[in-house]
Amino acid sequence: MKAITYVTTVVTRLEMTGDDVLLVTLADPDRWELPAFEAGAHLVLILGNGMRRAYSLCSDPDDRYHYQIAVKRETSSRGGSAWIHHHLGMGDWVGVSLPRSTMKLHQDKKKHLLIAGGIGITPMLAFIYQLERKCLDYELHYFYRGNPPLFREVQQAMNHGRLFLYPSSGNAGVRTSIEAIMPAYSEDICLYCCGPERMMVAYNQAGAAWPEAQLQQEHFSGVALDDASLPPFTIELRRSGKRVAVAGGQTPLQALLEAGVDIDYSCEGGICGACSVSWCDGKPVHRDKVLSAEERKSKLILCVAGCDSEKLVLDL
């Protein structure tokens, strides 16, 4: 029997928060409990236009009856956020994946430093709920322009945490501020960051000396690929022995889907981890933003991976 990986939910509330951000509340159609999740998790939504898109959960992990996501309307949308803003309605049924995590709360640490940029506040709100409940020491540094998304929810959730606001910071301001925020390394501190790409670059540069486990992060800007970076190769599926040719300029995910192989996927930009698979042989080229150096020894992300050998063997 194939394991359940998606469940059906229904839209129970739609509310604008901040500038061009829609807060979507989902529940089980029969009011049953939803699959559990922890702060740092996201859902893959199957949209009415056939697209699959990943969105961070911003609701309280202790609320087993509701999922909440916040979706920013992007002018450069490939169809995900635009469809949600223009077509999703109250009472609509939406298929969602089981929650997956790209960040994790390290409860053994004495202090937790959250850094959010704009819509990157979404996973941080879920962290705040858990940190408050566990009475852990934390602070939130929130960068934004205009009306900050989920600001009311953040204020209501925070009790003993410390809040620092950075309105309308330009690129240089973000970089300088993050450098100032970043503490000296300590094994008792864990850092968490989600925001636009310039923020993530500054965060990783400032935290270059920190271990990956203490430098938690979630990206929402996908990897930009060009055809020249995607030479042809052959995929071999270990379990079936099937071979699939990957053409130049094509990703492994695209080739496998064209060949009729059932693969879970979402962002198509190397940031959600939905299409992670194990590899057995070959020389994969890793371009994703989710796998750690240790994880890359056995796994790859199909939507952005390449190959430096003629053949890549996958555990499929």
Image: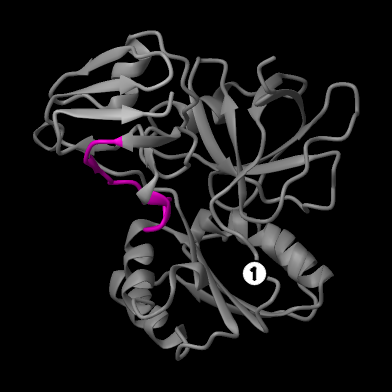
Residue 85 placement, left or right of 268? right
Q: Give whichever of 184, 312 is nearer the camera.
A: 312
Residue 36 lies in quadrant: top right
User: At numbered mark 1, what does the secondary structure look like: helix, strand or loop?
Assistant: loop
Residue 134 in picture, x, y percent from top left:
81, 72
The residue sitting at the right extreme is 31
Residue 138 in picture, x, y percent from top left:
67, 79
Three-letter residue code for mark 1: His
The residue sitting at the left extreme is 228
Is 283 inside the magenta-drawn segment?
Answer: yes
Q: Give whichever of 95, 145 is nearer the camera.
A: 95
> Can residue 313 be seen by looking at this rendering?
yes
Residue 308 placement, left or right of 254? left
Bounds of the magenta span? 281-296
Residue under the point 91% across and 28% down: 31
Residue under the point 42% across and 29% down: 315
> Can residue 142 be seen by looking at this rendering?
no
Residue 231 placement, left or right of 115? left
Magenta: main secondary structure: loop
Q: Mark 1 = which residue? A: 106
The color scheme shown is: one colour
